[in-house]
Amino acid sequence: MFLNTRSKPMDLQFYETLEKRCELSKVESGRLHTYRNGFTGECLYDQLFDEAGHEDVLIYRDLYLQTERSVTQYDALIINDDGIVVNEIKNYTGEYRIEGGEWFRNDRQISENPAAQLSRATGKLIRIRNSVNAGFNISGRLIFVSDDFYLQTDDDSIWRKLVVRMDLKRYMRSFRGGHVGNKAQYIARLISERIVENPYFEADVDAERLQKGFYCGACGSFSLQKSRFHLVCSSCGSKESNETHLLRALADYQCLFYGKPMPSRSFMEFIGYRLSRRIVQRVLLEHCDVDKKGNQTTYSLKYRNFEEKTVKLQRSYKYKDYLTK
Ligand SMILES: [Zn+2]
């Protein structure tokens, strides 16, 4: 049983949003590719676990846990009465080699060491367990979700630490018949009390680079024509309500200038003054938390995920969206 949803990581959201509003540098494109690839792998893992069944375990996904003074990220934690199994998910493709403890792809050493990552991650959980004097097992596996992943190694002991795609469903099914009783509930509580927001995410973008205004939700074009309650895309003909555009722009702003307070004047500039202050103000008041300090008022969107919110809102909107694809 999944205990939480897996939402798109902030870093991925950032680069996807950035790509919509400016030309990415080579480094930025590389990062977007890496984050997207990682997230695709994690979603595939979830899907395979759904197919294999997860009734006999509790699973936390994509967590940041506070342990003493550091914060550690976990792709998946599988919990039952026996304890916790850490799954570090890798969406590697191609030919890999481990030699002398170092990882290589096509003979080039890679920047991360998955086995070391896993051992750090399990080590932090052992600290948490020991700090409360609890007795349960903690172990971990590296999960390689791609069926296009090949590994050669001089260290046979590594195979016990990893699961490749061919064996993945069998591995997931091996949790069947386990117990989720008081002990598992206790472990889950121990974990949930230490969940924190991703502290490593930093958005840093030069506002000058960004294209201002609204763009089409279907094709991404910034060429939109105003009709009374909608904006109509000149490229593909999609028609989206003013609210949809404003919510998407709010989510973009929030992501690109993460953690920075948003005065309405900055937002008006961000949307290129394409809608009147009156319409914008109404949407800000409806969908944002308002923070008043002296004569400065700033807004922050109440929701984290634009897509989830707009899907729900569509039902209550007076003015619907009509996407061509
Ligand atoms: Zn369009």
Image (cartoon, rainbow, N blue to C red):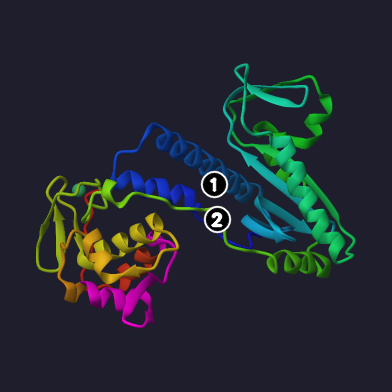
Reading the chain from its start, which is encountered first: label 1 or label 2? 2
Q: Give amino acid for label 2.
A: Arg
Using the image, tell me which numbered label, if any, was put on residue 6.
Answer: 2
- Horizontally, is 277 left or right of 114 in the view? left
- Horizontally, is 301 left or right of 76 in the view? left
- Horizontally, is 217 left or right of 172 in the view? left
The residues colored magenta run 280-308
- Residue 25 x/y as whole percent: 36, 35
Question: What is the distance, in whole Å, between disc 1 and disc 2 at their CAs?
Answer: 8 Å
Indicate the secondary structure of the residue bearing disc 1: helix
Indicate the secondary structure of the residue bearing disc 2: loop
Using the image, tell me which numbered label, if any, was put on residue 43.
Answer: 1
Residue located 73% across and 58% down the image: 57
Q: From what the image shows, is residue 15 above or below residue 242?
A: above
Determine which quarter of the picture holds residue 60: bottom right
Q: Is residue 30 shown in magenta?
A: no
State yes or no: discs 1 and 2 in contact (Cβ < 8 Å).
yes
